[in-house]
Image (cartoon, rainbow, N blue to C red):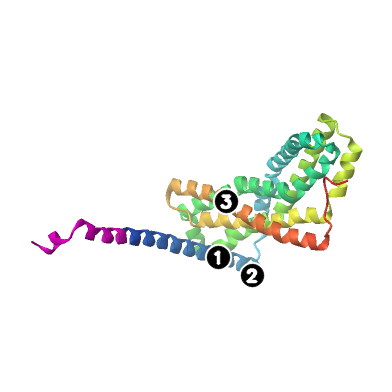
């Protein structure tokens, strides 16, 4: 009888378990290595972009079209979104506040929610969906058709010519879009609360002014700068590293929005923790929306 025949099924079982465990560890190890390499590649992409931005600013002819694409064309969708979000907040919050007799404080809740959280996040989400996906698709098409390689061969740095103008446009103009979303949201909430729900206008405005300060507005605008940088960098990176073919361009556009949105939420949480700590250290008493 051969040696292979002398091995019982019970003796083969540990070898099968070891093989499965080895394959599982190898798969997770490969996934971890790919993630580390991707993060490193993205960090180098960001570093080179920032280095070019501080070394040589792009010309006006390349900046203005990006300003128009990011800022002017995004105003209608941001304004419309902000208006209806303010109305939705009024609809959802009114019954709860009316049950406890504090419906006049609805203005403070709507305004504070908009300027600190919903305004910047929704403006960034609209920008990621409208501008970020377009950036990734445009740069991905240029990568597939070898236009980026042609720029490099002609001596023009693709990062300075393509990425830096888009990054500057997103970082500089998203605060303006955030302020627009805040304004339209407050206006929509005011219109629905005063005209539709019949809340007293004097107390509504009084509580809005009392519960919302300059630091709250600063928080939203400050966070929006980080959101704009995330949208620009993620979208341009996905476009530059687009897979060949039309399917690759579509995946790059989709991935740019998904990754941007996830990173926006993560950064929003971290900034909220830091800024709330600063706010509580400066104003320990805080603001009591439901207090006397």
Q: Is residue 97 shown left or right of residue 39?
A: right
Residue 219 or residue 144, whichever sits in front: 219
Q: Is residue 6 located in the magenta-colored stretch of the structure?
A: yes
Spot the residue most to the right: 202
Spot the residue most to the left: 1
Q: Residue at x 35, y 60 (%)?
A: 21
For residue 63, which quarter of the picture?
bottom right
Report the predominant secondary structure element of the magenta stretch: helix
Q: Which residue is mark 1?
A: 43
Q: Is residue 58 located in the magenta-colored stretch of the structure?
A: no
Identify the mark nearer the N-term, 3 or 2.
Answer: 2
Q: Residue at x 82, y 46 (%)?
A: 289
Q: Which disc number belongs to residue 159?
A: none
Label 1 neighbour load within 10 Å: few <14, some 14-19, many 20+: few
Q: Which residue is mark 3?
A: 135
Residue 267 or residue 57, whichever sits in front: 267
Residue range highlighted in magenta: 1-19
Label 3 vs label 2, nearer the camera: 3
The answer for how far apart the CA atoms under marks 1 and 3 are is: 19 Å
Q: Which disc number belongs to residue 55?
A: 2
């Amino acid at each position: 009888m051969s040696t292979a025949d002398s091995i019982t099924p019970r003796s083969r079982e540990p070898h099968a378990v070891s093989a499965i465990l080895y394959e599982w560890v190898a798969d997770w190890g490969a996934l971890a290595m790919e993630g580390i390499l991707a993060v490193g590649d993205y960090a180098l992409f960001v570093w080179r972009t920032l280095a070019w931005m501080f070394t040589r600013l792009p010309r006006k002819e390349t900046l203005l079209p990006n300003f128009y694409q990011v800022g002017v064309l995004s105003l209608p969708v941001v304004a419309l979104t902000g208006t209806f979000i303010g109305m939705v907040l009024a609809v959802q919050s009114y019954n709860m506040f009316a049950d406890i007799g504090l419906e006049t404080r609805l203005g403070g809740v709507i305004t504070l929610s908009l300027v600190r959280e919903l305004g910047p996040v929704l403006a960034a989400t609209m920008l990621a969906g409208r501008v970020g996906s377009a950036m990734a698709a445009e740069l991905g098409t240029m990568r597939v058709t070898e236009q980026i390689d042609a720029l490099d061969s002609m001596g023009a740095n693709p990062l300075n010519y393509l990425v830096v103008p888009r990054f500057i446009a997103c970082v500089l103009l998203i605060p303006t879009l955030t302020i627009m979303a805040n304004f339209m949201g407050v206006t929509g909430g005011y219109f629905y609360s005063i005209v539709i729900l019949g809340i007293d206008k004097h107390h509504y405005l009084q509580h809005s002014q009392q519960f919302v300060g300059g630091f709250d507005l600063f928080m939203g605008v400050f966070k929006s700068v980080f959101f704009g940088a995330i949208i620009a960098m993620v979208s341009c990176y996905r476009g530059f590293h687009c897979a060949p073919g039309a399917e690759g361009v579509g995946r790059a556009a989709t991935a740019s929005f998904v990754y941007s949105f996830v990173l926006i939420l993560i950064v929003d949480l971290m900034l909220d923790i830091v800024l709330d700590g600063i706010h509580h250290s400066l104003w320990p008493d805080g603001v009591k929306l439901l207090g006397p």
